[in-house]
């Protein structure tokens, strides 16, 4: 647009809405089941739903219904292609937060935020 040539790296499909008062966030790929290519974790509890889609131990998509607070953190793990093999089950925890990340992932996240 300004005359410089820059390659577009692509984007990520994102949707955030409130449906009948229920907050929903969906980002990235939405594999329907675990296959050779994707690992899918789903947790339903107390009217909430959490789905995390992984490829090679990296988040490639997620859907949160109610309890959407960790959406930014999970998106950052996806954006930075962080290997989550050591804590992937914790992503389904209803109280998943920055504190649940291993020290190296916390440092990486902080360094990315300040870069």
Image (spheres, rainbow, N blue to C red):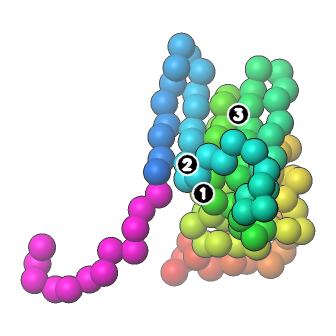
Q: State the CA–CA distance, disc 2 to disc 1.
A: 8 Å
**Label at residue 27:** 2
Q: Specify the farthest residue to the front.
A: 36
Q: Residue sitting at 39 percent across and 74 percent down?
A: 9
Residue at (64% x, 72% y) in the render: 81
Question: What residue did someone put label 3 on?
Answer: 67
Reading the chain from its start, which is encountered first: label 2 or label 3?
A: 2
Q: For residue 7, what is the image quadrant?
A: bottom left
The mark nearer the N terminus, 3 or 1, is: 3
The local secondary structure at tag 2 comes to: strand
In the image, 13: left or right of 46?
Answer: left
Rendered residue at 12%/73% (across/down):
1
- From mark 2 to mark 3, how far is it between C-alphas? 15 Å
Q: Position of residue 19 (x, y in %)?
A: 52, 20
Q: Is residue 8 magenta?
A: yes
Which region is colored magenta? 1-12
């Amino acid at each position: 647009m300004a005359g410089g040539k820059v390659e577009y790296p692509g984007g990520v499909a994102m949707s955030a809405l409130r449906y009948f008062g229920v907050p929903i966030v969906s980002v990235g790929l939405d594999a329907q089941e675990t296959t050779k290519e994707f690992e899918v974790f789903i947790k339903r509890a107390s009217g909430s739903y959490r789905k995390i889609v992984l490829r090679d131990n990296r988040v490639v998509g997620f859907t949160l219904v109610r309890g959407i607070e960790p959406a930014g953190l999970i998106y950052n793990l996806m954006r930075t292609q962080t290997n989550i093999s050591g804590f992937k089950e914790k992503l389904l925890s209803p109280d998943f937060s920055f504190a649940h990340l291993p020290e190296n992932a916390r440092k990486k996240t902080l360094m990315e935020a300040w870069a």
